[in-house]
Image (tube, grey):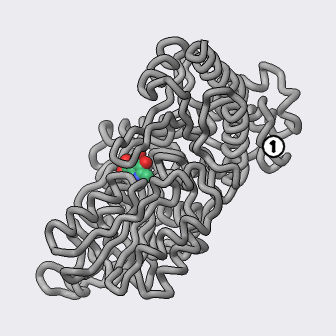
Amino acid sequence: MQDLSTLLQADDHVEDLGKLSRRSFFQRSFAALTAGSLLPRVLANQAPIEAGDSAYWRWVADQFLLKPGLTYMNTGTRGPSPRSVYLAQLDAIRQSNEDRLSYARYVHNAEFKDGLREKLATFLGCSVDELAITNNTTEGMAIGTNGPDLNPGDEIIFTNHDHSSGGQPVNLRCARQGTNAVVVDLSDKKFHPPKSPDDIIKAFDAAITPRTKLISFCHINYTDGCVLPVKEICELARSKGILTLVDGAHPPGMLNMNIADLGCDMYAGACHKWMLAGQLTGFFYVRQDLQEQIWPSIYSGPVQGKNMYGAIDDAKRGTTAQRYETHGSSNYAAAKSIDAALDFHNSIGSSAIEARDRHMATTAKQALGNMSGVEVFASEDPRLCAGLVSFKVKGVDTKELSAMLWERHRIYIREVVHEEIDWDANRMSLHIMVNDNQLDRTLGAIEEIAKERRA
Ligand SMILES: Cc1ncc(COP(=O)(O)O)c(C=O)c1O
């Protein structure tokens, strides 16, 4: 086997990925296997990456461990990890089993955790003291919903296109404490596809009353893939003294995002979906000046600056957003996977990834839109759409379509069905483990099924 420095030197001179030989591809794959994301970073620094550069993105897709012949389009539920992330986790598990003493030191290694939080904060566009590392989006949504003090009769808004991870904590709080849930109805046909951000903002505005204290909503809906006008909704809420909690299960890793720019008060996100870290990885952001008002739900750190015995304890875990992650032992391998996933993303670049996902989504929307008997729910307006594409083939049950694509072609997409809001669609997650051939094949397979049904 060649050593890593030889491979890095060899790759240092590559300028045109499109002209790469099989050998270079092998070298890159090998190096990514051993060095995580070093190689893409070298490449990213050398030439701008085009969203339509099939060869480059094929190489990126080849970094995943997915079985040959399998097309995976459900990152929106769970993202598979690239090799470097997988190996980082394996290594952490190995360390923890080989040497318990070092493991204990790693697990409680504040330096590693601080560095990780810093790196994640830079990636997400917020300050390190506003960020907690959590297990998933649901955890952050629950903390955010339960965090502020509210009185019976106060109102919390959510939408009927939210995930249960956002809606059910609100319903639970209302059942327990007598606050009232107010649901914004996004089921109207005018939202599918949405025509303008204004319609959505108006729907939120109409739901606000003098009793509204909190608005909880998705950055990107998991049903129709709509990107909501977060900034405008947060501005509206702030102008009326209302807190905002954003469900960010999908954008991190898909969009080149900046939480501070969104202007929200709280943001709960996943690292295990589009960010491609291991399972049980997420984060929760709370604006610095609000943290005293947002109570943690599960907590074992200092209370009012004191430890359990009443001695002064002003450690950061009690005075920053770390209060939302201070609850017992954590998973070192999961944290390592976030670290490696950040390296992987940074080596390609968030804006290149966003452009790639959007490029695939546009290709899919155009092709599906041109097929007879196929309805596309995703907007053409880039402000209102990104990497999730929802659609329906008329006359084909959505579960049946997912099953046919799997059984005939080993293509994995999902359906999202909620009769209560008249929602029944198939959904593709278009992310960087999908290569152009796979996308073309999927679109061809859907067209074939639509034709069969028309015949
Ligand atoms: C919009 C949305 N919110 C929350 C969740 C739950 O995410 P997690 O598994 O990170 O808790 C999902 C899962 O698919 C989702 O689509």
Work out whether residue 260 or residue 29 is closer to the camera in this orientation and state it. 260
Residue tagged 1: 50
Q: Position of residue 46 (x, y in %)?
A: 84, 47
Work out whether residue 332 or residue 249 is closer to the camera in this orientation and state it. 249
Work out whether residue 99 or residue 363 is closer to the camera in this orientation and state it. 363
10 Å crowding of disc 1: few (<14), some (14-19), many (20+): some
**Residue in the picture at 42% in, 35% down:** 90
Classify mark 1: helix, strand or loop.
Answer: loop
Residue 58 in view: no
Q: Quadrant of residue 156?
A: bottom left
Work out whether residue 299 or residue 264 is closer to the camera in this orientation and state it. 264
- From the viewer's perspective, tell me whether residue 245 is left or right of residue 6: left
Q: Residue furthest left?
A: 309
Number of marks in picture:
1
Which residue type carries mark 1?
A: Glu
Q: Position of residue 201 (x, y in %)?
A: 54, 70
**Residue in the picture at 39% in, 83% down:** 290
